Image (cartoon, rainbow, N blue to C red):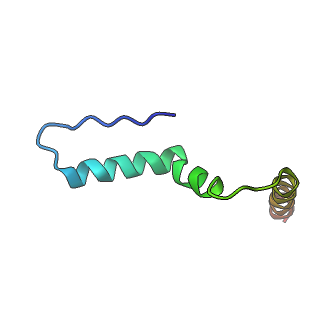
Amino acid sequence: MSIRIKARSGEGVEQLMRRFKKLCEKEGLNKDIKRKQYFEKPSERRRRSARKSLRRRELNSR
């Protein structure tokens, strides 16, 4: 997953950084980095996934 940004003519550094941050957020890079910041046991990952699935099912059944 590589994000490349080319500077447009007359574009400042602030605008370039803003576009870069938007692309990172769109790709889910920030969320992925936060999730992988600490080691999570596979059993914990499955448990978290099951809770998330249960919440989704409860919201859809209303």
Vertical side of 31 occupied by 4: above or below: above
Residue in view at x 45 percent, y 47 percent:
24
On the image, the x and y values in percent for residue 3 come to 42, 37
Task: Measuring from the top left, give residue 36's x and y in whole percent.
Answer: 64, 52
**Viewer-closest of 2 and 15:** 2
Name the image quarter holding the C terminus.
Answer: bottom right
Residue at 24 percent across and 51 percent down: it is 15
In the displayed structure image, the side of residue 18 where residue 34 appears, left or right = right
Is 22 situated left or right of 46 in this image? left
Front residue of this view, candidates 40 and 57: 40
Which residue shows up at 55% across the image and 48% down it? 28
Q: Nearer the viewer, residue 51 or 56?
A: 51
Q: Position of residue 31 (x, y in %)?
A: 58, 54
Q: Depth check: 39 or 58 in front?
A: 39
Please determine whether, in this image, residue 7 is positioned above or below residue 55: above
x%, y% of residue 58?
86, 63
Residue at 88% across / 54% down in the picture? Answer: 43
